[in-house]
Amino acid sequence: MKQTFTSKTPVISDDDAPKLTQAAFDGARLRVAGKDASRSEWQAAVRARVGKQRINIMLDAPVVEHFKSVAGGRGYQTLINEALRESIRGQDVVNAVRQVVREELGRVTA
C-alpha cells in the first residue's frame, strides 16, 4: 500500500535572500582574522589555509585531455594533483623497500 504524506505548512517558493550580483562581490570587504585586508593579503591567507600553491606548468596536450575527459571537464586539476600525490607515495614505497633491502644485504655480507 502506497502512503502519501502531505504537509499543512505552505511551501514558500521565493527565496528571501537577495540575489548576489557582480556588483555585490566587487563591493565586498576582504578580511583576514577579523581585520580588513588587501586582495593580495586575503589571497595569501586563503592559500596558507588551503595549503595549496598556484603555479604555471606546461603539460602535454594529451595528458590534459585525458584528465579533462576523466573528470568531465571540471575538477581535472584535482585529478592531476591526486595522480602526483600517488606518484610520490609510490616513490616513497620504492625508496623504503630499497632501504630495507640494503640493510638486509648489509647484514648478510657483514
Image: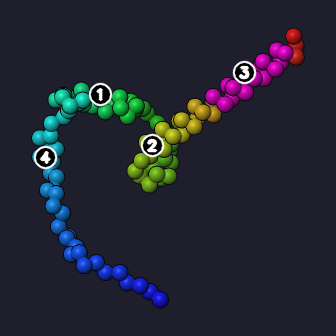
Residue 24, label in figure: 4
Residue 70 position (above or below residue 60): below
- Identify the mark nearer the N-term, 1 or 2: 1
Majority SS type along the magenta span: helix
Q: Quadrant of residue 57?
A: top left
Q: Are marks 1 and 3 in contact (CB under 8 Å)?
A: no
Q: Which residues are magenta?
A: 92-107
Residue pictured at 11% horizontal, 46% vertical: 23
Residue pictured at 88% horizontal, 13% vertical: 109
- Give the labeled residue for mark 2: 78
Taking the image as shown, residue 31 lies to the left or right of residue 23, namely right
Q: Position of residue 3 (x, y in %)?
A: 41, 85
- Give the labeled residue for mark 1: 44
- Identify the mark nearer the N-term, 3 or 4: 4
Q: Is residue 54 visible?
A: no
Is residue 95 highlighted in magenta?
A: yes
Q: Quadrant of residue 58?
A: top left
- Name the foreground residue: 102 vs 74: 102
Element under label 1?
helix
